Amino acid sequence: ALQCKVCKYKIPYFGCFHGANETTCERREKCAVIKTSLGKVTLYYQQGCTSALNCGRERASDAESRLTSRYSCCETDLCN
């Protein structure tokens, strides 16, 4: 099974701020870095496992805010 790094909040230039760990993903999951942005400004990153279906997608965090989350995936141990 794929091993991935986990981080709840990774701040640009500071590194992982909260929840640093490693985990084993489920069968159809890949390692992901999820970049959360407000307009063109990157606010923070998250690391962990995600469904392969999310890979390469960008989605609005919710209808109210202008935050977007972009999913970048990889498929080797601790690649994120």
Image (cartoon, grey):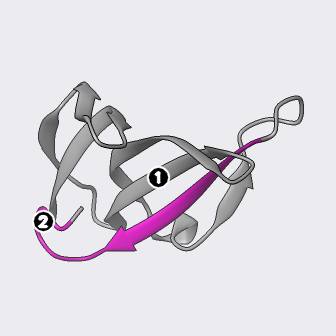
Q: Nearer the viewer, residue 45 or 54?
A: 45
Amino acid on which disc 1 is placed? Ile
Q: At 12% from the left edge and 61% from the top edge, which residue is drawn?
A: 78
User: Quadrant location of residue 57?
Assistant: bottom right
Is residue 18 left or right of 40 when viewed as pictured? left
Q: At 17% from the left edge and 32% from the top edge, which residue is drawn?
A: 20
Q: Nearer the viewer, residue 42 or 63?
A: 42
Amino acid on which disc 2 is placed? Ala
Q: Tell whether position 50 is magenta.
A: no
Which residue is disc 2 drawn over? 1
Q: Which residues are magenta?
A: 67-79
Which residue is disc 1 drawn over? 34
- 18 is higher (above) or lower (below) than 50: above
Is residue 27 left or right of 4 when viewed as pictured? right
User: Quadrant location of residue 75?
Assistant: bottom left
Q: Nearer the viewer, residue 27 or 36?
A: 36
- 6 is higher (above) or lower (below) than 40: above
Q: In the displayed image of the protein, which residue is found farthest to the top?
A: 18
> Of helix, strand and loop, which mostly describes the magenta segment?
strand
Count residues near mark 1 (Cα–Cα under 10 Å), then give few for <14, some for 14-19, many for 20+: many
Residue 28 screen position, x and y as percent: 36, 68
Residue 43 screen position, x and y as percent: 54, 38
Q: CA distance from mark 1 to mark 2?
A: 21 Å
In the picture, the quarter occupied by the C terminus is bottom left
Is residue 42 left or right of 65 when viewed as pictured? left
Q: Nearer the viewer, mark 1 or mark 2?
A: 1
Q: Tell whether position 68 is magenta.
A: yes
User: Quadrant location of residue 18?
Assistant: top left
Count residues near mark 2 (Cα–Cα under 10 Å), then give few for <14, some for 14-19, many for 20+: few
Q: At 13% from the left edge and 35% from the top edge, which residue is drawn?
A: 21
Which element type, helix, strand or loop, lies under badge 2?
loop
Task: Tell me, for residue 76, which label it has, or none.
Answer: none
